[in-house]
Image (cartoon, rainbow, N blue to C red):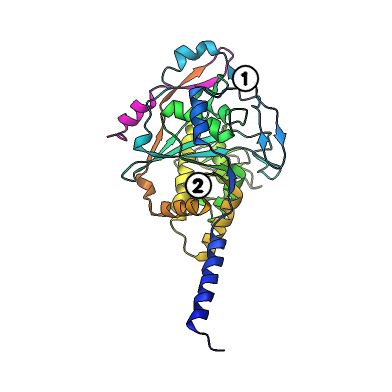
Amino acid sequence: MKLNKQTFLAIGIVLIGVTAYTLIPNFEREEFDQDKIEDISSGTITTTTLEETIEDSSSQITVPTEDQEIFEPSIYDTLLVNNTSKRIDEFFTAYLIIGSDERTTMSSASRGNVEGSRADVILIVIIDAENKVSLISLPRDLLIEDPCTKNIQRINSSYIKNECGTNAENLSAVILNLTGLKINHFVKFSFEGFEKIINSIGGVEICVNETQREGYSFEIQQGCNILNGEIALNWIVSRNTEVLVGEKIVNENGEDISSWKPMPGVSDLTRIKKQQQLILSMMQKINNFDSFSSFLNFVNALEDAFTIDNNISIIEASSLLWDFRGIDFDNINKLTVPTYNFRTSNGAEVLILDENFYNFIQSNNLLD
């Protein structure tokens, strides 16, 4: 049968439509009300009640776990003097990346299954008028005042749904007060989903200066290694990392009889550097898609891993991801807010902001 131009056009339209439908991931969406965030940050909306966990088809409300300690308010005046900043919305577009450590029975056995979810990774991506990109990490142990509950607590404890707002809205209200940045959009990923993303792109390259391990969860050799999702995630969350002393020795039974020692200085800030390295390594890998099928595998992994706010369309989110392929990730500013360690009267280890965020941004030449 001879096909005319109209038939070819119709077939082309159908193919384009099918391709677009296949490529655009079906992200889970979450409410993200900018006006509500402003009201929470200013104290217009408050609550003294933390909802009990409720799970149904439409919502999940969580409460702090035992490690999300609430501190006595008497320490506020002396410790949180740098926790407010001028508004700098006019200078930047800001995206919030939240890494949730929510785990299920499908999670890696070495990380275990815990109840609830915490903001284990808090990253702000800011883009200025000249499209210069900076990646700013907020330590999860940073001490803040929650404008919703008025509690003095770690910042990751503000990632909770209650009478004020959703998880992301409450955390964004804290960030607004802390940094002066209005979060334009947010994206949340789970560690479990992140494993799938890493595996979908064939692993990520991580380079270390010395051979290191933690129990049976991972062992990474000195130099550069291609890590699968499980090993990469175990590496960034490690709290009891050991480093090899001398040469690696394996006996005739294949048992490791080498000498190992605890890695000094492992802290929340160490984990942040790993997080930044892992995310940038993953984004660099995305720049090198060499086949249509590899891109499809990546897109399918995104669907299971990411939640985005309801103010950005699926097409806009996909387009933004695609545009990131052109970024020179080696030249991205990778920053962490300056902090110092503090031990509370009951022995809790927290981090205190050491400089006002506005001054911090200025000192890093991000404001003209």
Task: Identify the mark at residue 258; answer none if there is no mark.
Answer: none
Q: Residue at x 62, y 41 (%)?
A: 217
Q: Is residue 362 left or right of residue 184?
A: left
- Local packing at callout 1 (Cα closer than 10 Å; few below 14, some 14-19, many 20+) is few
Q: Most extreme residue toward the left, as rendered? A: 368
Q: Residue at x 45, y 12 (%)?
A: 78
**Residue range highlighted in magenta:** 344-368
Q: Residue at x 56, y 12 (%)?
A: 345
Residues 289 and 36: in front is 36
Identify the secondary structure beneath mark 2. Answer: loop
Q: Is residue 364 left or right of residue 225?
A: left
Task: Indicate the position of residue 45 as horizontal and vertical percent values.
Answer: 55, 24
Q: Residue at x 57, y 40 (%)?
A: 31
Task: Indicate the position of residue 102 as horizontal and vertical percent values.
Answer: 63, 38
Residues 344 and 304: in front is 304
Find disc 2 in the rendering and name its residue: 312
Visible in this render: residue 210? no
The image shows residue 324, relative to residue 141, as above or below, that is below
- The amino acid sitting under disc 1 is Thr
Q: Is residue 359 magenta?
A: yes
Find disc 1 in the rendering and name its residue: 48
- The amino acid sitting under disc 2 is Ile
Visible in this render: residue 14? yes
Separation (CA) of disc 1 from disc 2: 31 Å
